[in-house]
Amino acid sequence: MVRAEVIVHLKPGISDPEGSNTTKALHLLGFDAVQSVHTTKVWEIDLGDTPEAEAREQVDKMCRRLLTNPVIHDYDVEIRS
């Protein structure tokens, strides 16, 4: 079975209000060593017996069409067999 892991994160310079709020909350809870928190989203996609090259191509299309907003997101894809 082929599984793709897609990690989606905000591009540099894009505001991350959820990360900022989490940083503030951690400070309020006494975790003063925390300097920043950044949010990411991970998608695990099972692609059955799809050949690896085809799986990568399909996952890239999925990212461009649905899983990411190319204006604000970057993503990394890892294909595992």
Image: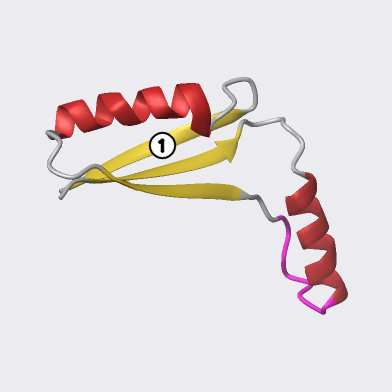
The amino acid at mark 1 is Asp
Residue drawn where x is 51% and y is 28% of the image: 66
Residue 74 horizontal side relative to residue 76, left or right: right
| The magenta stretch spans residue 20 | no
Q: Nearer the viewer, residue 69 or 49?
A: 49
As drawn, the residue found furthest toward the bottom would be 30
Q: Position of residue 17 (x, y in %)?
A: 80, 46
Q: Which residues are magenta?
A: 29-36
Q: Position of residue 80 (x, y in %)?
A: 21, 48
Instruction: Report which quarter residue 15 is drawn in.
Output: top right
Please say if 71 is above or below 12: above
Residue drawn where x is 76% and y is 51% of the image: 18
| SS state under label 1 | strand
As drawn, the residue found furthest toward the front would be 48
Q: Position of residue 54 (x, y in %)?
A: 19, 26
Residue drawn where x is 12% and y is 33% of the image: 51
Q: Nearer the viewer, residue 33 or 50?
A: 50
Residue 46 horizontal side relative to residue 41, left or right: left
Q: Which residue is mark 1?
A: 76
Residue drawn where x is 83% and y is 67% of the image: 25
Q: Nearer the viewer, residue 22 or 63?
A: 63
Label 1: how many residues lie within 10 Å, few (<14), some (14-19) or many (20+)? few
Magenta residues: mostly which secondary structure?
Answer: loop
